């Protein structure tokens, strides 16, 4: 058994922003709209915003140097993306989801976040960094646990 095939999928699960399965509820159409209408740049805008928000945590702040001007630009870009997706591209689907299951809007954006993260994970440099994780683990101890 190749233990890297066990560890790498586990790593990928950490990259998922929202583990809910929005495709199993009445918001299927909204999820479909968001994932098809969001461009690659829209997805990058969302991920940059999440990254910049997470970077505000006191335990992470030292690893990021996002200037006030950069944060304003990130906020502006994600605001434009959200405005377009919510009020233009997927307006009807948002209205329907709001009537039937308001929580579905957040769930649908969770799926969009998963799609966006998946896109980032295909970058060669990101994949290389993630693929290094098994080298950080004491494989003998791990193998003893899973035997």
Image (cartoon, rainbow, N blue to C red):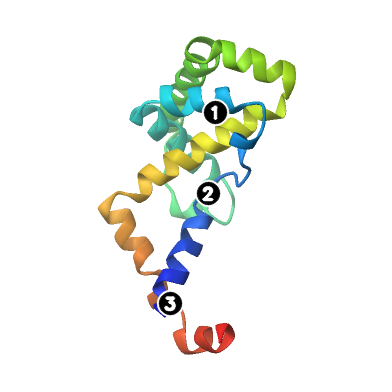
Which numbered disc, 1 or 3, marks the residue that appears first in the sequence? 3
Crowd rating for badge 1 (residues with CA inside 10 Å; few <14, some 14–19, many 20+): many
Crowd rating for badge 3 (residues with CA inside 10 Å; few <14, some 14–19, many 20+): few
User: In the image, is residue 146 above or below residue 67?
Assistant: below
Residue beneath disc 3: 3
Which numbered disc, 1 or 2, marks the residue that appears first in the sequence? 2
User: In the image, is residue 127 above or below residue 42?
Assistant: below
Q: Compute the Cα span from label 3 to label 2.
A: 21 Å
Q: Position of residue 50 (x, y in %)?
A: 51, 39
Q: Nearer the viewer, residue 136 or 30?
A: 30
Residue 69 appears in the picture as rendered: no
Residue beneath disc 2: 16
Helix, strand or loop status at disc 3: loop
Q: Position of residue 8 (x, y in %)?
A: 43, 65
Which numbered disc, 3 or 2, marks the residue that appears first in the sequence? 3
Instruction: Determine the residue positioned at 38% across, 62% down.
Output: 130
Q: Nearer the viewer, residue 57 or 67?
A: 57
User: In the image, is residue 2 above or below residue 128?
Assistant: below
Helix, strand or loop status at disc 1: helix
Instruction: Determine the residue positioned at 43% across, 29% down.
Output: 74
- Give residue 31's mark: 1
């Amino acid at each position: 058994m190749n233990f890297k095939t066990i560890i790498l999928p586990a790593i990928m699960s950490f990259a998922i922003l929202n583990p809910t399965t929005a495709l199993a509820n009445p918001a299927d159409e909204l999820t479909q709209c968001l994932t098809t209408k969001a461009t690659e740049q829209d997805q990058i805008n969302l991920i940059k915003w999440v990254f910049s928000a997470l970077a505000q945590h006191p335990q992470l702040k030292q690893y990021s140097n996002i200037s006030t001007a950069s944060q304003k630009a990130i906020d502006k870009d994600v605001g434009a993306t959200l405005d377009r997706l919510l009020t233009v591209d997927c307006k009807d689907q948002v209205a329907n989801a709001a009537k039937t299951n308001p929580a579905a809007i957040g769930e649908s954006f969770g799926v969009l976040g998963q799609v966006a993260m998946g896109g980032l994970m295909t970058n060669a440099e990101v994949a290389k960094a993630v693929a290094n994780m098994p080298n950080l683990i004491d494989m003998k101890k791990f193998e003893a646990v899973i035997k």
